[in-house]
Amino acid sequence: MSDNLQTAEKSVEEPRERFIPIGRQEIVADLIADPHWTADQQKQFEEFCKIFTALYHYKFYAHLEELKHCYAPFNPDTDMVTQQDYTEEDKQKRRQTLVDEISQLLNNANYEELTIEAINDAMNAESYYGVRVSVDLDDFEKLIVYYRGSGIKVDYKRSWTSLFLVKKPIEIPIYKRLFLLLKLKTEQQRVDELVSLNGTDFEKKAQKQVRNSRQNLPEDIIEEQVFLKLFKNIPRTDLEMLFPNQNVRLKLFDKIKLALSGGGGTIFGLFSIISKIGAAVINPFALIGALIGLIGIIVRQILAIFTHRNKYMMVLSRNLYFHNLDNNFGVTSYLIDMAEEEEGKEAILAYYFLLTQSDKQYTQDELDRAIEKYLKDRYEVDVDFEVDDGLRKLRNEGILNDQDGKLKVLDLHQASACLDKQWDNFFNPDDKQ
């Protein structure tokens, strides 16, 4: 692994992953297949899992409806027509609720927040793809970045050390899932900020700087829109390629190469002109031909620079095409599914252990260690199990009781009856006691 990639990997110090990389259906099927159940208990536990899963599906559906309500004024992809006139106060309230709901969903889905410091460290590292991109993070009024799962991707690349004859393996640290929420500031907001930092004489330069920063944005972008993006397997050194206000920069090696090739051609052209000046008195067409040749060389070198830049843009587009998972409103549905999945796994695992191993009288810490050991032994995954979340859900449903620090749950019949009552309360709120 190159030093730059190693530096990028070490710059992000992450907690142990909370995400359980095993499907809920597989976990439930394995728990149901436990040989210690009687046939009746097995059926009751299966019924409990179905009811609990359905209950949380309905609860998360309510979250999805709230997200729809909040995201409607800011969705860049909407094709809906509305007569509703949103006030600025209403927009601000909906935007903040949207951010709060999304952040809670990401936490429920066991994503980790990526700090601005970590983002800047990644942007300053050398890109694996050889693409250097500048991004002005201060362009954004709202910028939230979360990731879930980190790992190493092995790729093969030719390098000058092997005279580009042999592909060598390269280890690339990646984020397996990466989420972005972006909202641009208005151009005037950003200009005013730059002027306040640099003085009133800087206004024209500030306007030019903001225009250059956003020159690659589509013309139909509205600054009040909120963008939600979800990607997979993104190299940590290439986070900048995910931002909409990116500007491609040539690497130093490429600049030198172009300068040498372009300069060499231009110098050769100048020598050609000088050598023909003497002959120009006799044959002026020779001088004209030399001048045309020089102009051709200069144009060719300029076109070479643009071609090189376009090649970089093609690399960016290709990578984003294959790394993109979902966009905007589709991201909300995706996150709802992931949060529902994680919440279900945590609660069902906690209930199973407290029910089937009630003789051990687990404390919270002991339960945490027992479930982590089970996941390690059964699935060979090392995770930081969210025991707090699992117990909170059981407690909220009235299934869990704490007695002197020892955790106790209702038996299968009582727990299922408790969940049935929760269902009844959803559709008959007057029956709540």
Image (cartoon, grey):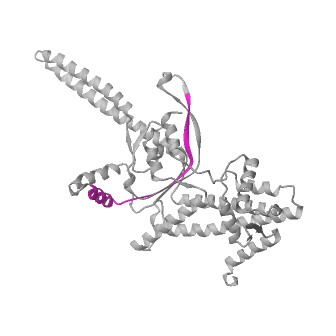
Q: Quadrant of the N terminus?
A: top right
Can you give x and y, in whole percent of width and height, for residue 108 in the image? 61, 61
One can see residue 128 in this view: no
Looking at the image, which residue sits at the far left? 281
Residue 142: image quadrant is: bottom left
Q: Quadrant of the C terminus?
A: bottom right
> Which residues are drawn in magenta?
168-197
Is 71 part of what is drawn in magenta? no
**Residue at horizontal 58 percent and vertical 66 percent from the top:** 64
Relative to 313, does residue 104 appear above or below in the rendering?
below
Left/right of residue 243 with respect to residue 354 in the rendered view: left
Looking at the image, which residue sits at the far front? 404
Along the line of sight, which residue is nearer the eye, 275 or 114?
A: 114
Left/right of residue 304 with respect to residue 32 in the rendered view: left
Is 174 part of what is drawn in magenta? yes
Can you give x and y, in whole percent of width and height, for residue 259 in the image? 31, 29
